[in-house]
Amino acid sequence: MSAAQSGSTDRKKAQAYYEEGRGDYQRWVIDSAVKNFQAAVKLQPDKGLYHMSLAQALARSGDFDHALRSLANYLRLEPNSPVASRIEQLFASGMDAVEEVLTAKTKAAQIPLDMIGAAIQMWMEFRISLGEESLVIPKPEAWAAALDYTVRKVNLRDTTQKEIASYYGVSADTVRKHHELLVEMLDIMPCDYRYFTGVQNPLDKLVEAAELLESLEARFREA
């Protein structure tokens, strides 16, 4: 097989791994998505999109160090990408405009530091999850408000979109839209383990109840 034929075969295999990985990613089969994207990158390391997709899957799995490495590879291959500046901000030592507003307002509201940290983590994960989609931020207060509202809801804090919107000087409709996008992109649930900061997560009781039910059913079926 010639070098050209070998290269063409590798590209086709890489594309197949990539497409399978995207399907896994959409279904939240994250371990498989990571493996497929890694296989695609290995076969075609000069394809920026594959590195971006791997970063998305790694971030979704909680492996942020390797996700950032993949993003660095994406920037190296796609320095003129329309989303390059947004990705570069993830490597900055300082906070971006949204984080600055979020931190100032939540501290003023005496929100615990661990909840503020959870909101900042949510913001990082969201920006990575966007991949090559654009993100326009004409008013940082809007995203800061949505992050604040979402992390409070996850942690069972009583608040309303109207109250948060008033506090940040934005519309309740804007808070709602941004909140819904956060929930959709990150698949956020009540008491989500990624962002819940309390000592006792109510979801633990559901897990315990499910395990108990499974045990009781097994005993019930015993001869």
Image: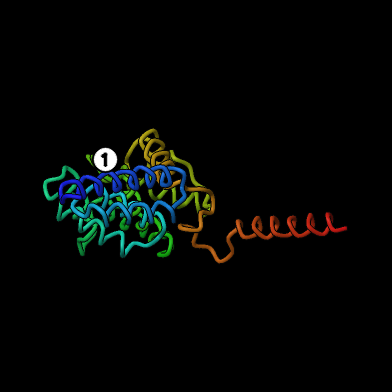
Q: Nearer the viewer, residue 215 or 133?
A: 215
Q: Helix, strand or loop at disc 1?
A: loop
Res. 141 in view: no
Q: Residue at the location (39% across, 59% down)?
A: 116
Tell me the kind of residue under disc 1: Glu
Q: Compared with residue 65, is residue 109 higher up or lower down, i.e. above or below? A: above
Image side of residue 55 versus residue 187, left or right: left
The location of residue 190, given as percent across then percent down, is: 54, 49
Res. 24 in view: yes
The location of residue 157, given as percent across then percent down, is: 52, 52
Image side of residue 34 versus residue 198, left or right: left
Q: Quadrant of residue 213?
A: bottom right
Task: Count how many numbered circles sit on residues in the image.
Answer: 1
- Residue furthest top as drawn: 173
- Residue furthest right as drawn: 223
Which residue is the site of mark 1? Answer: 133
The location of residue 178, given as percent across then percent down, is: 37, 39
Image side of residue 215 versus residue 159, left or right: right
- Report the quarter where the C terminus lies: bottom right
The location of residue 169, given as percent across then percent down, is: 32, 41
